[in-house]
Structure formats: structure tokens, C-alpha cells
Image (spheres, coloured by chain):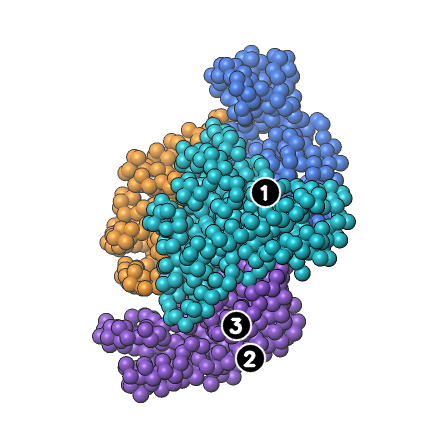
Chain colours: A orange, B blue, C purple, D cyan
Amino acid sequence: MLSFECDYNNGAHPAILKRLLETNNSTQVGYGEDEFTTHAKHLIAEFCGKPDAEVYLLTGGTQTNVVVLSAILKPFEGVLTARTGHIHTHEAGALEYTGTKAIELPSHNGKIKPEDLSEYLSAFYADVNREHMVFPGAVYISHPTEYGTLYSRSELVAISSICRSYGIRLFLDGARLGYGLMSYNTDVSIQDITDLCDVFYIGGTKVGALCGEAVVFPNGNLPQHFPNHVKKHGAMLAKGRLIGIQFEALFSDGLYCMIALHAIEMAERLKAVLHEKGYRFFLETDTNQQFVILSNEEMNRLSHYVRFSYWERYDSSHTVVRFATSWSTTIDDIESLRRLL
Amino acid sequence: MLSFECDYNNGAHPAILKRLLETNNSTQVGYGEDEFTTHAKHLIAEFCGKPDAEVYLLTGGTQTNVVVLSAILKPFEGVLTARTGHIHTHEAGALEYTGTKAIELPSHNGKIKPEDLSEYLSAFYADVNREHMVFPGAVYISHPTEYGTLYSRSELVAISSICRSYGIRLFLDGARLGYGLMSYNTDVSIQDITDLCDVFYIGGTKVGALCGEAVVFPNGNLPQHFPNHVKKHGAMLAKGRLIGIQFEALFSDGLYCMIALHAIEMAERLKAVLHEKGYRFFLETDTNQQFVILSNEEMNRLSHYVRFSYWERYDSSHTVVRFATSWSTTIDDIESLRRLL
Amino acid sequence: MLSFECDYNNGAHPAILKRLLETNNSTQVGYGEDEFTTHAKHLIAEFCGKPDAEVYLLTGGTQTNVVVLSAILKPFEGVLTARTGHIHTHEAGALEYTGTKAIELPSHNGKIKPEDLSEYLSAFYADVNREHMVFPGAVYISHPTEYGTLYSRSELVAISSICRSYGIRLFLDGARLGYGLMSYNTDVSIQDITDLCDVFYIGGTKVGALCGEAVVFPNGNLPQHFPNHVKKHGAMLAKGRLIGIQFEALFSDGLYCMIALHAIEMAERLKAVLHEKGYRFFLETDTNQQFVILSNEEMNRLSHYVRFSYWERYDSSHTVVRFATSWSTTIDDIESLRRLL
Amino acid sequence: MLSFECDYNNGAHPAILKRLLETNNSTQVGYGEDEFTTHAKHLIAEFCGKPDAEVYLLTGGTQTNVVVLSAILKPFEGVLTARTGHIHTHEAGALEYTGTKAIELPSHNGKIKPEDLSEYLSAFYADVNREHMVFPGAVYISHPTEYGTLYSRSELVAISSICRSYGIRLFLDGARLGYGLMSYNTDVSIQDITDLCDVFYIGGTKVGALCGEAVVFPNGNLPQHFPNHVKKHGAMLAKGRLIGIQFEALFSDGLYCMIALHAIEMAERLKAVLHEKGYRFFLETDTNQQFVILSNEEMNRLSHYVRFSYWERYDSSHTVVRFATSWSTTIDDIESLRRLL
């Protein structure tokens, strides 16, 4: 069936599978000490414009969020997040399971506002009872957000500047970072992210890989014994090559950006079709996820022909649904959708 | 370089890669709800002779150990393990990170003795201070053990019987289960394991897959909301198909057993070569891992030609090293080794 | 200095000290197995109108909140709380440190509204992604709240009824319960609380004791091996008699209620003085805490003569402060305050 | 009944109760910021011969062990302890509940040997797989131990020296420290402990107080935001004065040492009686706990007249029991015991 359900409903980009085949007979050391992983880390650091950045390859997004946050926070610290942040809503309490509190900021289509952050921090440090409270130790943002929205460069600069003035780490969840970088409507580059964040990750799972997220510590700030920390979270693969090979492929010959750009192009066509057919947008974004309000009848009708994601209830007779594109979305898919709508 | 370092120094068995290629264009639901995973679960339950067993697919061994143990233990319980148990020695404290204590029993070449278990439990329940102690809630065994050794059927029956008489769960770490089942010298079948254990897993990573461990709850005893628990541990893959496809391949056409049997055959040849060349065994096992005592000079000499694993110091001038076989070990490898020794 | 800072700025009610002296030479078993504790538990169960209620004596409020919540929640569950709930704001992340998430509901002067609770739960169970979310397992309310406010009986009935219809536990933090029960303006009795809650505690520390909180499980629902759980939290006193003796005194001859009633009487006089002097209330409550808005100049002037608590910033030139009464507040204190204002 | 069961079977030393009475009407700030606590901290630092040592007052032993260890260990570290260490045996897994592993060393009547420690550490740092293991971050010793035994000064010097050479913290559990300092047969002074340990505590509960343990960080090494950490563990009393007043009394006029010396004197008399009556010692110690082997018949006979503690099974017909003295033991008690034996 035609599927716009999400960006992880498919297999890997063919170039990745090809590379898995080519390297299969190579004998390698385990636990991410293999040559492919080493090469991939080097390629990623180069991509970030910071050759001496420390890069680690993990398996999935929730895992990466908790491994990173529990490594960078001190015992008395928690993490600030938008009310809609993935760590706060859809990770089954994985963050709290590591003993850490999520401190909520308002969400503006998935983003936090620098002024809300600033206000929270100044109020916190003015509070005489703060020794009985969780100290803000990091800010979690996603880019693109869970709603497909993007921070502008000036917003990131403002957030980063506030974090630095308070000695707080800025952590960017880039599970879909490629779509942010390749958006037609962004002024944020990977170099900006490297400059402005203390740690971030470049998502593979949702940008063409079978699995894998590349964590980047750009500033010589790798937590002490980080591999031990990864192991303690059950997040170290014996055959670490599995992720190394995929990221080697993604960051060779510009594949990562090409995959993301393709999905963006498909998303632009998708938006055009939705507009043409008179659909009402809940949120029209500059990345690969689009949110549309359907009447419940229309939603039921469509669900027989095309897969999309339930997002949330809109009102008693309407629902917000999500359409997403990925490396595997084709122009034919878009045209088929046009015919169905 | 010739490598007998471990059973995860290679890629996937070619049949697994082939299946990844064939299925790559299929659009599927995420998070392990895909058709391949469903099929794989069914095949595994059949393999265990218990069609209604509940099967879950996780990524790696340490992750599986902590996800399972933290799910089956009650808040006042810990887990009994041999002093050499993987959870107690080489998982970076992952178990304790979930708040759980490992309670140590003596190790006999990696195994626990039923009498030691029995004695511990009777002493515990005779202790008037036990309300201040961690209650024994589960027994962890590995089969094959970390030392490549195997339990006999009568030993497993005895351990299982003790566990059941005390209401304690028996959990078998089968990261290398295939090699145990296909050993020339075992009387333990998968049906025995299914009958005698409360939960166990069938290892993929070390038996031909890229990653993946299949957890089996045979007795309608799946913990409540287990997928939520998996998610909370950061152990749920968005593209769950990655593991589903691999286990579908492993449990179609007897592949899993064939891979294991091949490695056992290679291990038997390896043992013959080691004997022929007069090497001294630290532990000669019936599975795919063999432990040899080398003088440090010999160890250094060999290390230029062949990879093996440092195991432990034997004495001031000798070291215990491990040679392992896997799906990718060939007769040529064994012959090359014979020429080198 | 005159002090209305809080209800824990003093020592113990003299009757409690007297009882500590009388019993000092008695030799007793440790760890809360002493005769005084046993007697106190019996007296408390009688006070609750449920002679077979299970009662446990712990030391302080934060400790009690986390010991109880971590004991009653299942691994996939979190706790619903008002945004202003003590567990969510002023316990330094103690709850999350036990691996548990606080799920936020709106706060109405410290209280949750039954309709907000109901709406949250129905939305949760309608959400197709709920297996990726933290399940609501308990509702935390405080009575009196952190703002000195009280639930009405009908509100408690509504909340309890919603909880029971969803199979969720209702936990009432009664750190200041005495003041709620003895308020001039409440229709909630201890019997109501016993009937409507699944677990609650009767605070000692803030109602005349040196330390101590009495947890009541009214329905035969004591968690398995609860003393072991208490020990695991470092919350078991070797000389458990210290708390037993205090609660024995508090629940003999109606002392607990008399202490609370006295503080309520003083609070009523305090309110009258504040009104008489034209102070503006931020929140005028029916319990022992009153919240007043002071200009910053007035706040500074008063702070030289009388202690009160900073509560929160009101606007750029005004501050909310708290005045509290306790067993040790005297009519003279109130008159002295009248002269100062 | 005559009771030698333990050193916490009684109330507080009368001088402590007297001080609680005298101070009861004083109005004070909460949470350990009161004048008594401040004064007590000062007195304790003086007692330790280190006026600028940082001192914190907690409630009980298990609580103190986990609050301290979880504060001083880094995320990749665990704690080395004798097999019989209290944290490893009788704290219900409180240590592991904070995510920390206990790493076991052999026990020699409750003590660790410097050579065992040294051997463990050199083997650990020689192990190529150590990144998959828990790093040794601290050494836990008790003095007196759980078996009433004492380290010699030279043993403490050796252990401390090993710790410092590896950058590992030395933590001394002094729940019964007074009895160690006042033993007739020790060369270890409080100044030695202050010099040789990185953190230790001076037990109050078992040396005459109702509750309370004084943690000392002698070297300007107080963990960052330690009060926040205490709060997070539910270990901060609202009426912190309760512990402050007790320690103020204990460290005024030499009371702490006098209490301990009295118990030692009683223990010496007790040993003489046990010898005189021909009892067989399991362990005859230099502190306030003595371990005797009784035939089960004798044990049953005695248990009708005198309380003692079951320690452990000796053989099928004999049991090890413990007799302990404390501030409240009198010469009359010893004489009564002599008549009973």
C-alpha cells in the first residue's frame, strides 16, 4: 500500500546495503573498534568542519538521548525541554529511569523560545529555595522538532548564548537532522550546530540507514570513559561495524545530504498536492513531515488506500494526521496520492 | 590477518544479507510490528516447540540481560549468578544501573552447581535478618557459559527444580545458544530449555547475525507492558524489521543450527590441531571457544600472524588465550593456523 | 525573634518530650519492632477508623513520598501531580531518582481538578502511541496543599472515583494533615480519607513532632516486603522507637488534633490581624499557612522584627510571603505581630 | 529483661535528652541551618583536628552509606568492599538501588587486607577488557567492622596509600567509631582517620544518640551541591535541629568518648565473665561486640533470661551469638548475667 506514514517504514538506502555486502567478509575487531567505524567517525568529524570532534555511533534515538543526557548531567542537574520534547513525551520515561528529571518549558510548534529559557533560568537563580530543586544542567532541543519545525540561526544563537552564560550544556537531538540541513528554508548549517551546541547527534535511522545515530562532542568535551557509559546502558554492539559501515556510506560521496534533499523535494511536491486538493494544514513545515486536518470520514476513506500517521485529535469530527517522506518516496508515490485525494 | 579472536569479528551469514536485500523495498510498520518480525517470532516459537511462547527481538546481549532481569524481578529481589557470570563481570555495571544486585555463587568453569544454589537458598531463608537483605528472585545462567562450557540436562533439571521449589525464576543467557545445541557432546535440547527455564534468549549476534537476540517467555509469563519496558531501556528499534528479517532468515530452512554446527565442526578441527601441535589447554570445551595456555614469548610470536583473545594471566610467564570459531571460519583457516603453530 | 516562618521552626510539643523521657530506660528491639511503635500503629489505625489498616512510621516528607510511590507504582507507571506538587517542585528530583516520572496536571491554588484528571486519562487511553508513554499509575495530591488549600469532600470523592474507574492508586500527602482535619471550614474527615485513598500519610514533623510521618495502607494493600523496601531507601531507623514514641504520644488523649486545632485558632487570629492592618492577601486559607503580598519596602522593614517565608515574586515591587502557625505559636506572638505591623 | 542484644536497644544518653529539653523553645531555621547544627559541625571539626573540615549530619547508617557513596563515585565507578561489608550484605540492596556496584574483596574477620586490595587493583588495570568492567572508585571499610574488629594504624596507612596511588577515595563507615577510638587495644586516633580517609562518618545512633551520623569531608572535598544531594535521597530533616542538638551534646564535654569508653569497660567485664564461665568465643574483640558459640540447648535456655543477637549458624548443634554493650549497660547488668550463665 502507498505509505507516507513515517520515515522509518522502509529498509536502507541501496548504497548502504551495497556497502554492507562489500565489507561482509572483512574480519574486524568488535565493539566499535573496527576500521569502518573509525573511518566513519573521521568522515563525520570532517562533515562537521571540526576534524578533532569526538564521534560515537549508537543504535537508536531514545537510547542516544538517555546515554548522552545521563553522561553530561551532574547528579544535581536535570534537563530543560519543550513540553512536546520527545524525551518528555514518547520515550516511556527512559530519561527518568536514569534518575533524571525533565524540566518543562512551553512549546511553540515543538520549539522553545529563548525568552522562556532566559526567564526560567533567571527565576531559578533568584529562588531562595533552589537548593531543594533540580538544577538546570542542560537544554534539550530537537532540530527538526517532533513537529517538523526548524530553529532559525538567530534562535539557536540566542539559546546557545543563554546556555553558555549560565554554564549549561546545549544538546541537540538531530534524529532527522538531514532534513533540517537540506530544507529549502533554513539558515542553519552543520557548522552552526557544531559551533553552537555542546553535543548533538546526526540521525541515521530516519535518514536512510537501518539503524544508527552519530553523537558528536565537538569541543574536546567527551565524558570520561564514555565507552564504559555506553556499555552500561546496553548500547554497545558487539558487531559495531554494523553502524560504522552505514555511516561510512552515508558520509561518503554526499549520500546523507542527497537522501535528505530527495525527501525534502518529495515533501515540497507533497505540499503542493495537498494545497491543490484543498486540504487544510495543521502545520505546514519546511522539512519532511506535514500535518493535515482531515474530517474523520475523509480519514477513514483514505486509510484504505494510503498509510499516514494519526497525530492527535483536532475536534470531535476532525483529526490531525501526518504525512512524511523519506529516501524511498518516489514521484510516482506523490502522483498516486494526488489521484487518491 | 587470520582471526580466531571471537565469533563477532565478521559480518552476517550471506543468507541473512540476501534476505535484507530482498525485503528492502517492502514498506512496513515500525517498532517491531512489521510482518518479518511477526513471522520470525512465529518461527522461533515453533523452533522451541511451544507455538504460543511469547518472543521479543532485542539488539544485543548486555541490553537483553538488563531488560529481561529488570522486568522479571520484583523491587526487593536480586539475581543469583556465578562469580564469572557476564552480568557480574563484563557489562560495566549495567545490571546495578537498573537498581538490581547481583548475588554471587561460586563458579565452576563458568557454571553454578545445584548444591551451591540449594545451600544459598536454604541459608537465606533460615536467616532471621533476611528482611535486611536482597531477596533471591532469579537465577542467571549462561549456556554455553562465558568459558564455553555446557550444563548437562540433569544439572539443568536440578537447577530448575530448585528454582521452582523456591518460586524463583530461571533465566538462561543464550548469547551462544546455537553452539550449545549443536555441540557433539550435549544432551540438552531446545525443548529442554523451553521446559526448564522461565525466560531465555537465543543469541543472533554471535551466531551469524549482524545483531539481535530473541527473548522467549515460554509460559504465558510475559511481563505486563513489556514493549513499554523495552522502550524505556532505549532498546526498541524504529526499524525493528532489521532484527525481524535476520531472525526470519536464521529460523528458516534450519540456518541457525547449520551455522552453529559449522562452527562446532571447525572447533573440533581446531582442537585437533592444537593437540597435534602439543598446546596445553586451559579449558577444552565442547563448543566454539577453546582456551589455551601460551608462554608469553609464543603469544607474542603468534600475535603477528593470527588474532586471538587475551583471556587472563596464567602465571608470570604464561597467559590464557581464547580461540573461537564462527560461521565464517573455514577449513582453510584451520589449515593456515596449523602451518603457523 | 518573633517567627511565623514555618511550622517546623520549633522543637517538639512538650507532651512528646515528656514521653521520650519516660520511656528512655526501656530496653526495646530495634528497627521499628519495639512496643511503642506497635502501640502507635494500633492507635493510628483506630484513629483512621480502620483497625486493621497497615501503618508504617517513616522519618520525613520527601522520604515518605518516594518510599511510597516507588513501592506502589509498577515499572511502566508514573504519577500524576499538580504542577505545584511538592514531589514535582521542591524535592530535588527525589522521585525521578527512583526512576519514576511525574506527569503534570494544572494546579489550581495547589489542587488538581477532577475534570483535568479525567480529561488526561481519557486522552491517554485514546492515544494510539500510549505504549511509548509513561502509564498513569497513581495520583498524588496533598491535603492541605503546598498553598494551604483544602479539597472538599466532593472533590475527593470525584478524584477517588476517577482513580478507581481507571485502576489508579490515590496517594494523599498529609504532611500537614492535622491542619486540614481541624480546619474550621472543611467537610473532610479522617474516615473520608481512609475510605477514598489507597495510601496516605499523617504528618508528624510539621504537627508537633521532632520528626516522623505515619503511612497508612487502609485496604490490605501493603506492598510485598515493605520493610525491605524501606530499608533499601535508607529510611529505617535502628532506634525506630524514636518515631514510635512520638506517634504514641500524638495519638494518645487526642494530642494530634489538639495541636492542629491550636494552630488553626492562631491562624484565624493571625488572619484577623492581617485584615485589620489592611494587608492584601495573595491567598487566605482555612489552614495554618497564610499568603500575603507585601511591598518590597514593607517586606524589608518587617524582616528586622519577624521571620516569615519568602514565597514568590509578585511583581517588580511586591513579593508574596507566607506566615505560618504551629503548636508553639502563642496569643502573645499574635499580639506582638499586631503591634509590629 | 536483661538485654545485650545490640547497642541500639535503648533510648538516648540522658545528657542528650536534657539538651533536647533545654533547647525545645528556641525558634530556629529548618533543614539543618539552625544554630545547634552549626555549632555541632564546628565541635566535630575540632574533634577531628581539622577546623575547616566540612561536616554534615544525616539520620542513619544505611542512608549515610548510600548518600556518601553515590555522591563521591563517578558514573563509571563502583565501590570495593569486604565480602562481609554492611553495604554488601545487610542494606537490602540500597547501594545498588542508586545504580552502583559493590565489588567484593575477601573478608578477614570483617576487614580487608591491603595486599588483596593491591592485587585487585593491579589486576584490574592490567586487564585489557577493563572498559567493559566497573571501575574501582572507592574503598569502603568499617571501623570497627561488623565483627567488632579494628584496623591497626599501619593497616589503615597501607590501605590509604594504595587508594591515593590509584586516585581512589577511601570511605570509612564509623557507625560505631567511638568504640574503635576508645578501645583499650588500638593505635588509631581520630586524627589518623581524618588524615587517612577522604570521607568518614562518626556514628551517633549506636553511640548514645536517638539517631544521627556525622559525615566528615576533611579535605575541602565536599561534593558539589551536597545538600541538594541529601535532599534528593530524602535524607534531609525539616527539623534538622534534632540531630544538631544531639551532636552538640555528644561533642561537648567529651560526652561521645565517655559513652564509648563506658561501653568498652563494660565489654571488658563481659569478656571476663564469659571466660570465667568457660564460654567459647567465636571472636573476642577489642570493642563493644563479642561473639560466642553456644550449643543450641544453652542458647534456648539463656534466651528466656537475657536478650542477645543470633549471628550465624556454627554447626548443626551450635550457634554463634553476639553480646553487645552500650552507654546503658551497667555493672549490675554484667553481674546479673554472671549469675545467669
- Please, which chain is the residue tagged with disc 2 on? C
Q: Which residue is mark 1?
A: D285
Residue at 33% across / 58% down in the picture?
A111
Is residue D322 visible in the rendered image? The answer is yes
Reading the image, the residue beneath label 2 is C254
Mark 3, chain letter?
Answer: C
Q: Amino acid at mark 3?
A: Lys
Marks 2 and 3, how far apart in space? 16 Å
Which-is-in-front pick, marks 1 and 2?
Answer: 1
Q: Are marks 2 and 3 on the same chain?
A: yes
- Residue B338 is situated, as x and y percent measured from the top left of the image, at 58, 13
The crowding category of the residue bearing disc 3, from other C-alpha atoms within 10 Å (few below 14, some 14 to 19, many at least 20), is: some
Left or right: A50 in relation to C248:
left
Task: Identify the residue at the far bottom of this view.
Answer: C276
Q: Amino acid at mark 2?
A: Gly
Question: What's the chain of the residue with tag 1?
Answer: D
In front here: C58 or B86?
Answer: C58
The residue at 52%/17% (across/down) is B317
Disc 2 crowd, CA 10 A, few/some/many (<14, 14-19, 20+): few
Are the residues flagged by discs 1 and 2 in contact, CB closer than 8 Å? no
Q: Which residue is mark 3?
A: C18
Q: Residue at x 52, y 77 (%)?
A: C256
> In percent of the image, x 54 and y 13: which residue is there?
B340
**Residue A283 screen position, x and y as percent:** 36, 61
Q: Position of residue A1 (x, y in %)?
A: 51, 52
Q: Is residue A242 above or below residue A284?
A: above
Image quadrant where one finds the C terminus of chain C? bottom left
**Residue type, label 1:** Thr
Q: CA distance from mark 3 to mark 1?
A: 38 Å
Residue D226 position in % (x across, y down): 39, 53
The kind of secondary structure element at disc 2 is loop
On screen, B110 above or below C337? above
